[in-house]
Image: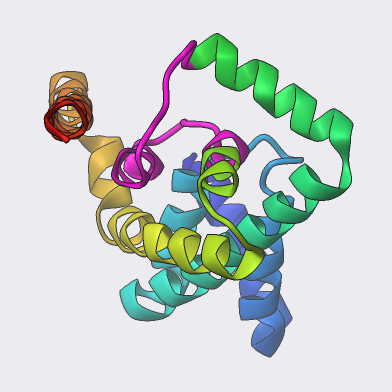
């Protein structure tokens, strides 16, 4: 991770004013390079500072959401692959928008899988993009601001944070189910 940050910093220094555009492009190429979202956002905070890094990460993640929408709707094989992954990871489970937002904050949860959930919940591309963009604010800010610190925490602190997010996720599901049953 440290080597990645150093080589990225040298590269960005050499490209000058193109650095923000290349960073956004890195967000778009991230799935092909098997880089986790958190690694790219950490690099953004390191290279551009908190505000600019979070803003550029938000733009990159939002563009990635748009690409996810296109991939799911234009390529039936891709949609099928994501649907099979959905059944494998969350069998017979319907997630709420709030749960998808919580999962977006968790590192290493498949970005396109969560996009598929949002696509299935929304009625149009415009609605999908609005909800998706709202759900990307928190990860862009959290990963950029705290990503480096989170990655340096002892394993038990990282596990505790993951368990806290999982508890919030579970609480939302139970709360949603109780609301549905009472209606």
- Colour scheme of the picture: rainbow
Relative image position of residue 83 (x, y in whole percent): 67, 24
Q: For this rendering, which residue is in front, 78 or 139?
A: 78
Relative image position of residue 79 (x, y in whole percent): 76, 33
Relative image position of residue 28 (x, y in whole percent): 70, 57
Quarter of the figure with the C terminus: top left
Q: Is residue 9 visible?
A: no
Measured along the vertical axis of the image, is residue 29 above or below residue 44? above
Q: Count the marks: how many?
A: 0
| 107 in magenta | yes
The residue drawn where x is 55% and y is 32% is 110
Q: Residue furthest front?
A: 183
**Residue 176 appears in which quarter of the rendering?**
top left
Highlighted range, magenta: 90-114
Q: For this rendering, which residue is in front, 177 or 167?
A: 177
Q: Is residue 49 visible?
A: yes
Relative image position of residue 181 (x, y in whole percent): 17, 26
Measured along the vertical axis of the image, is residue 139 above or below residue 46? above
Q: For this rendering, which residue is in front, 10 or 38?
A: 38
Q: For this rendering, which residue is in front, 61 or 14?
A: 61
**Relative to residue 39, is residue 81 drawn left or right?**
right
The residue drawn where x is 68% and y is 77% is 21
Measured along the vertical axis of the image, is residue 1 above or below residue 89? below
Measured along the vertical axis of the image, is residue 135 above or below residue 150? below
The residue drawn where x is 51% and y is 74% is 56
| 115 in magenta | no
């Amino acid at each position: 991770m440290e080597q990645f940050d150093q080589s990225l910093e040298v590269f960005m220094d050499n490209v000058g004013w193109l650095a923000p555009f290349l960073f956004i492009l890195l967000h778009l190429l991230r799935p092909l390079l098997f880089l986790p979202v958190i690694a790219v956002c950490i690099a953004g905070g390191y290279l551009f500072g908190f505000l600019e890094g979070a803003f550029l990460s938000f733009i990159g993640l939002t563009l990635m959401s748009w690409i996810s929408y296109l991939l799911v709707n234009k390529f039936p094989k891709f949609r099928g692959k994501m649907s099979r992954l959905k059944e494998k990871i969350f069998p017979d489970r319907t997630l709420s928008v709030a749960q998808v937002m919580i999962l977006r904050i968790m590192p290493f949860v498949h970005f396109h899988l969560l996009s598929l959930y949002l696509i299935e919940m929304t009625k149009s591309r415009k609605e999908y993009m609005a909800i998706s963009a709202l759900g990307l604010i928190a990860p862009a800010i959290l990963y950029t601001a705290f990503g480096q610190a989170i990655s340096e925490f002892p394993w038990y602190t990282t596990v505790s944070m993951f368990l806290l997010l999982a508890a919030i996720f579970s609480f939302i599901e139970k709360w949603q189910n109780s609301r549905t049953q009472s209606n």
